Structures are given as structure tokens and as C-alpha cells.
Amino acid sequence: MDILERFLKYVKIETTSSASSDLIPSTKSQYNLARVLIQELKDIGLEVYFDEEHCYVYGILKGNIEAPSIGFITHLDTSESAKGADIKPTITNNYNGEEIKLKNGVTLNSNIYPNLKEIKNKTLITSDGTTLLGADDKAGIAEVMTMLNYFANTNESHGDICVCFTPDEEIGKDTDFFDFKKFPAKYAYTVDGTELGEIAYENFNAASINITIKGTISHLGYAKGILVNSLAIAHELYGMLPNETPSNTENYEGYYHLSNLQGDEETTVMRFIIRDFYRANFEERKNTIKRIINELNKKYGNRIEIEIKDSYYNMKDIIEENRHLIEYVKEVMIDLGVTPVIKPIRGGTSGARLSFMGLPCPNLGTGGHNFHSYEEYITLEDMISTSEILIGIVKKYAKAKDTLERKRK
């Protein structure tokens, strides 16, 4: 089975996760892909472990030499931002760079998506326009499986290769039950990024903030000096924040984002997320909200309660201590004629959580674009190149035993 066959097979299996579920996996459909992968891993010759309760698939291709173990992690689920069932992949051979019109009024145009100009003459894969494509992260899965198949069917030297296919990455729960005993890699990569050549090892520091505002209700005709409208206080609070929102920021700029507002005159609940690449700025953002609430509490009489919960942190410091994770990939890409694209992740990543759990884990691009949307696309050639990068990484670690041992000493 080649990489295209694998990819088309995987995307046709519906695996949309659900943020409204308290279970892991959040949807039963993820088991369908998990069981397909379990059989394929066994057919290739891996030792396979399945956490059936939580739908984690682990595999180890035992090494044929003594070398550092290396791991690759991808996820089973797709985003619920766009329909993920009944996916009908559409293949455009020798894409001419012109506008493509799909169903549902979906159009791919290089004026909106400039990358389309760069993939001219490649084999373009989209949905039919009525669903997302599912390249996030089934392209990653296909690329990892292709890499495993290569080493299982050649005499190339390699250490232990560990893989894990996780549930519920799209709703931020994919590391909740990650079992390191079943994934004994010293270093790993998530294969879940976007464009070909992407190497990401910087991500936002993130926190969620819940604010509850208590008002006082009154007959409106006799409300003077009595009525305190919690909705009005919420409006005032929001207006006191800096105008640093996702729609106004880019690159390394952080932001405040009001993600949910529910309430009435008596009680209003505001939910914010804050993001910043720099830890000092991140802490200052939390302090800014605290100062605003303290000011409003003095004004209105202690009506506002705040709960702050850190979600994840920037993995940059941990990766910098294991710089070979980046340098090896850059060397492999350059050898293959792929330009390394090092850029920050304006979001979270499983690799950040895993890095702080003891497994240094930057993120690599899959070759896909416009994830979580009906305009999602990828090319066959970029998937092939990514699988070749993964193969090159394993080979690099097979030759790196002495170098890494000296660094650890």
C-alpha cells in the first residue's frame, strides 16, 4: 500500500472528536481508525499495545542496532469545526495553479491562498467541498506508517522506533492518558504541523480564565441606587483590556480572547483565554486582568470572582536543551532539498505538554494547509517528501549514538 492509498483510506474513516463530551475518547468513531492501524502495525511487524479504554495505539519497531530510541506521535481525531463525515477526497493531477471550484460554494484561489502558486504541477488533494479533508492529522498518520513500512522492509540500520496514535488532540485531551511505559522513546516528534519543511518548537504559554460577576436585580421602575447590572460590568471590564485580540495580533504577539459570555442582569460568566510566547508577558497578562478586577471590585463592592488555570507552557527552553532535535531535522531536510521553515506555533501542541512531562517533542509539518476548514488541501508530493524526512530522521539517530552520549555526559 503506497502513501496515497493509505491517506485516502484513513480520511474516509470518520473520527470527529467532540468538545462537549467528558469521555476519552470523546467519540466512538475514533476506535474504527485505531483498529485499522493496529492491524497494519502488526502486519508490518511492530509490537503493538492498545489502551482500549482510552483509544491510544502504541507500536514499537525493534531496532536492529543499538541506537537512541526515537518516537513519532500523530492523532486519530479530526476537528469538529467543519463536517468530518462522508469525506470524498478529490484529486487534481498536475494542478495548473488556477482557481478550483468545489461543491458547497467552496473555492480555492491563489489570491487568497498564495501557497497554491508554489504547488503548481503537483498532485493536489482536497475534499469535494462539503467536508474538511482530514489531513490534520491523517496525513501525519500516513507519513509515519510509510516510514515504518520502509524500515520493516529494508536492511537499513535503526534503533527502536516508537509510534503512538492518540485520541482527542483537537480538543486538547490527547496527552491525558499518554503512557510513557508503552512509549519508551528518549526523544520524539509530533507530526501534526502544516507546510512541508515546518519545524516548530516554540508555542504559546496559555491560560484559561473564568470570571463570575454578581449583580443585584430590582424592579426597573424603582432601580435607582439598587440595580447593579452584571452584564454592564462585564462590558466595562472588557473595555478596560488592551486591544490585543487574535484578530489584531500575529507572529510573536500575544493576546486576550473572550471566548464565551453568558449571563443576565443578575449573574454573568466571562471566559477568556490568554496567550503569549514570553513567560514574563504571560504572567503580566494574568496580572492585568487581576488589576482590572480589583479596580472594579472597589467600584462595585466585591462582585467579581476570578479563576485562572494555566493550560500549557512554551516548550522552547526544553527543546533548546536538546538542540539536536532541531539540527538533525534541518540537516535531513537540506539533504533532501527541502527548505526548513522554523516558525512559532500560534497555539498549543501536544509536544509542549509532552516536553514538560519529560519527553522533548517538537512538531513537524505534514504538508497540509487550511486545516479545520472546507478549503483544506495537501499534495501527494509533499506527503512523500515528509515521509522521506521521517526516514532521514531515523537514519540520523541511528548514527548519533556516540554524539548524544557525549552530550549527556
Image: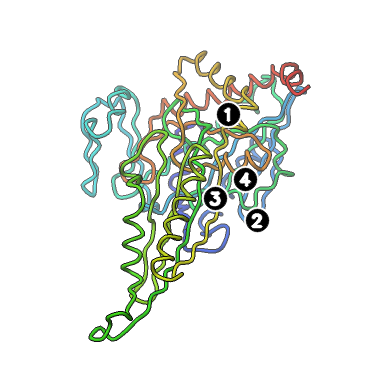
Which is more foreground, mark 2 or mark 4?
A: 2
Q: Circle 3 sits in a helix, a strand or a loop, which is it?
A: strand
The crowd level at tag 2 (other Cα within 10 Å; few <14, some 14-19, many 20+) is few
Q: Which residue is mark 3?
A: 311
- Give coordinates of residue 66: x percent, y percent: 77, 23
Q: Circle 2 sits in a helix, a strand or a loop, which is it?
A: loop
Q: Where is residue 300, by image quadrant? A: bottom left
Q: Residue at x 39, y 33 (%)?
A: 251
Q: Which residue is mark 4?
A: 38
Q: Where is residue 144, by image quadrant? A: top right
Q: Circle 1 sits in a helix, a strand or a loop, which is it?
A: helix
Where is the C terminus found, in terms of image quarters? top right
For badge 3, the amino acid type reads Ser
Between 138 and 295, the one lying in front of the other is 295
The label number, if any, that marks residue 147 in the structure image:
1
For badge 1, the amino acid type reads Met
For badge 4, the amino acid type reads Ile
Marks 3 and 4 close (CB-CB < 8 Å): no
The crowd level at tag 3 (other Cα within 10 Å; few <14, some 14-19, many 20+) is some
Between 229 and 128, the one lying in front of the other is 229
